[in-house]
Amino acid sequence: MKAAQLHAYNKSATLFVNNVEIPNISQDEVLIKVKSAAVNPLENLIASGSLKLMNHYALPVTLGNEIAGEIVKVGKNVLDFNVGDFIYSRLPATTMGGFAEYIAVKSAAIGMLPKNLDFKSGASAPLGALTAYQILYEELSVQAGQSIFIPGISGSFGQMALPIAKSLGLTVYGSGNSRDRERLLELGIDKYLDYKTENYWETLTDVDFVIDTLGPREYSNELSIIKPGGKIVSLIDGPNKLFAVTHHFSFWKTFLFSIAGMKFDKQAKAKNIQYRFIFVRSDGNQLEDITKIIETNNIVPIYDQKTFTIDEINKAITYMNSGKAHGKVLINFE
C-alpha cells in the first residue's frame, strides 16, 4: 500500500510516498481502509520537530492525524465495531498513520461516522471537535451562561467549536473573515467581528474564556478582554508547567516546559487569569458524544473543494499553508 512518510525532521514538512506492507492488527485493533484524510497544521509541527519533547518518532514515520474510512478487519477483542462499519478518528498521537491506504488502530480511538456526514466531511470533523470538547469540558469546565471568545472562528476549528459551545449554553463571540459571517450567524454565534475592520479588544470586555488559535502576536490583546479569574486556553502558544504536571511528564520535561511557558504564565497571572495549553488526544468515548451533537444539530464541516491524492501530499501541505483553502484540505483515497 502507499503511505506518505517523514524521513527526516524538516521545516518544509516534505514527505515521501513509499510502498509499505498493509499492517497486521492486534486483538484490540481494527484495520481501516482509509477513504479520506485531513491535512492539518499539526503535520507541520510534527515534521519540523517542534513536538519531539512530547512525541519522538522513530523515522521513517507515516504522518496523518485525522481520517474517515471503513473497517475491513477486527481483532477478536473488539466488540463494539464490525467489518463494514464507517468510522472517523483523531488518531493516537503516539502512532498517527492516516496518510496511508490502510491503518491499524485501537478500537478505543475511533467513533462511528455520524449519519449526516460522508467520508470527506467526516474526515474534517474529529480533530476540531475533540479539541473543542476537551477544552470546554476538561480545561474550562464551562457552565451555561458564561461567555467565550474564539479568534479565527471562521477556520476549521471554529466550525466545530461554535456549535458545541452553543449546545452547552455559552455566549460565543468570534472574529474571522467577512466571507463566513452569514454561515456563522446561521450556526448561532452571538457576535461576529470582521478581523480586517473590527478590533475585538476595542469591542469586547469581561469575557470568561478565550481559546487562542492565533499565537503569541495576539496574546496581549486576548488577555485584555478576559475578566479577572478567567482562563485562556491556547492551541498554539506552547506548553507550560501546568500542562507538564497534569500529563505526568518527567522532571526534566516539566522543567523545560516550565521555562518555555513562563512568559505566558507571567502575563496571565498579572491579570489574575490562568493560562492553559492543550494537545488534543484521541478518545472514542468522546467521539460517541460528539457524533450525537453532530447528528442532532446537523453539523456538516466544510472541506475545500480542491482535493488531492496521496501522491500529491506535498502539494496538499503547501496548499494548506497558503491560507487559500476554504475548510479542511483533504487527501482522498477513493
Image (cartoon, helix red, strand yellow):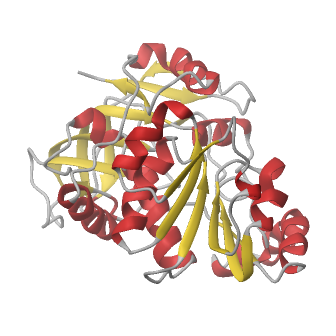
Q: Is residue 246 above or below residue 299?
A: below
Residue 99, relative to residue 145: is it above or below?
A: above
| Residue 296 % position (x, y) | 18, 61
186 shown above or below 308? below
| Residue appearing at x 54%, y 48% in the figure | 153
Image side of residue 90 versus residue 46, left or right: left
Quarter residue 288 falls in: bottom left
Percent position (x, y) of residue 41? 60, 38
Q: Is residue 249 visible?
A: no
Quadrant of the snapshot with the N terminus: top left
| Residue at image location 33% in from the left, 40% down from the top | 123
Residue at (52, 41) in percent of width and height: 155
Q: Is residue 246 visible?
A: yes
Q: Quadrant of the C terminus?
A: top left
Q: Is residue 119 above or below residue 247?
A: above
Count of marks placed on residues:
0
Snapshot quadrant of residue 202? bottom right
Residue 110 position, x and y percent, is 29, 57
Residue pictured at 83% horizontal, 73% vertical:
268
Front residue of 148/293: it is 148
Q: Is residue 90 left or right of residue 87?
A: right
Left or right of 13: which side holds 216?
right
Residue 37 pos. (x, y %): 38, 34
* Front residue (pair 273, 26): 273
